[in-house]
Image (cartoon, rainbow, N blue to C red):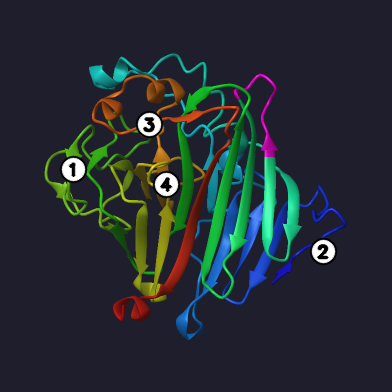
Amino acid sequence: MSTSHPADSANAPPESADFVGLAWRCGSLSVQRHAGMLAPLTFIIEGGRQVSPLYLAPWAAQESRPALPEILRNIRGEWPCVPFGSYRPQDGFPPDWAAVMGSGARDPYLHGYGSNVKWNWTKVTPYQVELSCRYPPNDDIEELIRRITPVPDRAAVDMELLVKARRRTRLPVGLHFTFCKPKTQAILRPGAFREAWTSPGPPYEEIQAFAPNCRFQDLRCVPANGGGHIDAMTFPLSVPAEDLIQLNGVDGQFALDLPGDNSRVSLSWNREHFPSVLLWMSNRGLQRPPWNGEHVALGVEPICSAFGLGTEATRNENPLARSGINTVIEFDPERPFRTTYRISAQALSAVANL
């Protein structure tokens, strides 16, 4: 395994380096300083085939980028969000959700401070990349530490997130995996879950395909705006959409079959930490520049949150919390929070033989 920058005596690349890469027998990856984002990630699977499932913004290689918030100008692949989500005003929400939305004073950043700034390289070896992000002095969170470690002799990458708090607090947290447009069509393979909810509020963007504030059990029959149902087990969807679905009471497993790559990409995480999965289905529903009705990406995001509706809504007794789903993680300065998770890949032919 090798890095794209020779490590110095402190096992860290030059502070100015924006990217660090690792390579091992079964793949290669790149880590970005901004938000500690992971991508590209290429797995080498059975038969010597390569699959690169994680998302890169269409302008990732351009020197001139669109006039967007920093998180979107640099968006790629996967990264941790502490806290997860952002404030939305209560207008258009049903009464039980509107009552918990709050003022937005606790959400100055989209997906938290760490999603909007450059992290620091703290350790880079031929086997692991470690970054840290120190939060502002007035924040309840003191520091995030992120470790990315390829699994020797496997098409898999392990990740670890350590959260240190300055004082006791309760926050929504998410692991923001985003997948690129598949070559043909992806087939969603969720693990077991208790129930699914469509987003309770008004559309985030111009086109919302799913009926808001609905509970259902089968991703093949999601209630549609205007009546009928939409099959959300395959992606891209059959209709333009910019939508969210939250799966609750999950078992900590999710997979995507990518027939165009003859591969299955799998995620696993601690379901006690992240009892839900948020599916972000961006399917030609963003009409304004720079998206222009062409953007296609699929988010599969293990979360402890309520639709990313912001800190106050998730802390308050929201409808999801009343249904028995935890929407915040409790942080204690005496006990740093630690969670681990994995992304892996294998050939569909190998899956069929299991």
Estimate the spatial distance between the alpha carbons at disc 3 and disc 2, rounded to whole Å.
Answer: 42 Å
Which stretch is magenta? 133-140
Residue at image location 64% in from the left, 43% down from the top: 145
Which of the two discs, 2 and 1, sits closer to the camera? 2
Left/right of residue 212 with respect to residue 104 in the rendered view: left
Label 3 close to label 2 by CB (< 8 Å): no
Image mark for residue 270: none
Left or right placement of residue 10 versus residue 273 in this view: right
* Residue 345: quadrant of the picture: bottom left
| Callout count | 4
Q: Percent x, y for residue 275?
A: 35, 41
The amino acid sitting under disc 4 is: Glu
Amino acid under label 1? Ala
Residue bearing mark 2: 6
Main secondary structure found in the magenta portion: loop
Disc 2 on helix, strand or loop?
A: loop
Residue at point 63%, 24% (across, down): 166
Q: Position of residue 58 (x, y in %)?
A: 54, 54
Q: Which residue position holds label 3?
A: 327
SS under mark 4: strand
Given contact means CB atoms under 8 Å apart, are the residues at marks 4 and 2 in contact? no
Q: Are marks 1 and 4 in contact (CB under 8 Å)?
A: no
Q: Earlier in the sequence, mark 4 or mark 2?
A: 2
Q: Nearer the viewer, mark 3 or mark 4?
A: 3
Distance from disc 2 to disc 1, alpha carbons, whole Å, reads: 53 Å
**Which mark sits nearer the N-terminus, 1 or 4?**
1
Using the image, determine if residue 305 lies above or below residue 265: above
Other residues around mark 1 within 10 Å, as few (<14) / some (14–19) / many (≥20): some
